[in-house]
Amino acid sequence: MDTELPAGIGHAWTALGAESHLLERVSSGGPPDGLPARSAVLGLARATVAVCSLAAAELTAVRTGGPVPRVRLDDGAVATAFLSDRLVRVDGRAATTFAPLSRFWRAADGWVRTHANYPHHRSRLLAALGLPDGAEADAVADAVAGRRAVDVEDTVYAAGGLAVAVRDTAEWAAHEQGAQVARQPLLTLERIGEAGPTGAWSRMSGAPLLPCAGVRVLDLTRVLAGPVATRTLALLGADVLRIDAPHLPESQEAHNDTGMGKRSTTLDLGRGADRRVFEDLLADADVVVTGYRPGALDRFGLSPEALTERRPGLVVAQLSAWGRYGPWHERRGFDSLVQAATGIALLEGSGGEPGALPAQALDHGTGYLLAAAVLRALSERHGARAGGTWLARLALTQTAHWLVHGLTTGPVPGRVPERAHAPEHRLVETDSPMGRLRHALPPVAYDGGPANWTRPPGRWGTDPARWLTA
């Protein structure tokens, strides 16, 4: 093993308020497979997984009363995990990653990136462009080609759809939202209340060492970054229950990747009966993770203040695309759109055309940082600073800013490595309710830790709305 620390881990570990001497427990190595890019994508992947692994090891020490286990980082395993959504198979069938209308379009003065994977986003995009609901790609291309990129951006967002003008890094820095992002830290983790558990957990032993054993997590996230975080907490022993609204469609293909180790149910929080079920679940929860745009869940009493008033001692972790600040704070967003807006798409493009990172790296990286923040909060809550209510906040744009401006040890700009990724030995197969499932092994690793999830994903939204144990 190479004992050199992954680039960026010190910055991320410091942002989590952790003790710097624990970085000595981390080593990394293995062949640097895959993730070819002009940006330091492999550096981002290494650092975020290393931070998450070290936070899991730290919590393990809190639970066992022993030393912090050593963290072992394998570059190939990390790269494979960052491609997990593209590598998952059910009975040999690959998932559909992007719909036909989720792509780059040439505008009158540049480029536009749209996201229309969900039917309601597709309908809103077409309506904003003045097209019928069944319109195809050629009609969209014609509609966009005659407009300025920022006009398409504004019109589609006003209609509730998703589109951004493709900007370079200088244009994003000059934009009010970009300027706000540049002033923010990578993440925040703070103690927002003194109430909460003060007693020590029962000592943990056995194998594997699961530091989240007994932790109950309400997962109110969608798509990729949030589900990657909660999938990681499930790996570490947490009872994770994902909750979705029954009227919002979700892709079973996406859940086949991010539902590992978790259960999934639907509740309509606008209905009295379902709301009471949720409140019963909250009364016994340790962690609530949300991944909706800021303020979207407040009307259901799911703001951090409202949640922690009803459940003191809770760890609340919030994720958004654009952050809780600036003119875009209420906008929906996805990894691909953030890449386009922040200059990454043009950095990764060629010949004047935009490109993309080799993986949904902002989603995956932010997901591991989010899990790390929850783990650190649990360590603080049950460690030397016993007790307290904790709040973590992260945004894809903050991770993007770190990738572009904070991680400088990647490939030389303009040169893409030629090495191909060979993930076969880091993929496993198991039976699932959907068929024979092939999936990537988890990259989070420390001495004595789990090598895989204990259960495959089930069918989305079909599990009972209750905790596994009373």
Image: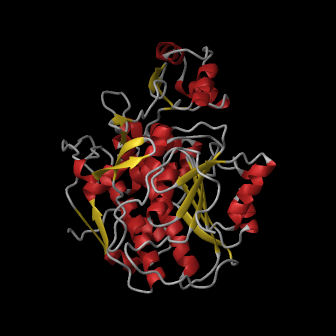
Q: Which residue is nearer to you in this view: 408 or 335?
A: 335
In the drawing, does residue 370 fall left or right of residue 25?
right
Residue 381 vs residue 228: left or right? Answer: right
State left or right for residue 321 relative to residue 425.
Answer: right
- Camera-nearest residue between 231 and 40: 231
Residue at image x 56%, y 80%?
382
- Colour setting: secondary structure
Front position in the image: 193 or 314? 314
Classify 108 as above or below 319: above
Count of marks placed on residues: 0
Q: Is residue 289 above or below residue 97?
A: below
Quadrant of the snapshot with the C terminus: bottom right
Decide: is 58 above or below 466: below
- Return the residue nearer the eye: 95 or 4: 95
Residue at image location 53% in from the left, 46% down from the top: 178
Residue 459, given in percent of the width and then of the height, sits at: 52, 44
Picture coordinates of residue 218, whole percent (x, y)? 61, 59
The percent coordinates of residue 329 (x first, y second) are 63, 46
**Image quadrant occupied by the N terminus:** bottom left
User: Does any portion of residue 363 appear in the rendered image?
Assistant: no
Residue drawn 67% across the image and 68% down it: 284
- Left/right placement of residue 287 relative to residue 37 reads right
The answer to whether any part of residue 137 appears in the image is: yes
From this viewpoint, which residue is outermost toward the right?
272
**Quadrant of the image occupied by residue 191:** bottom right
Q: What residue lies at 36% left-to-right and 55% top-to-bottom? A: 44
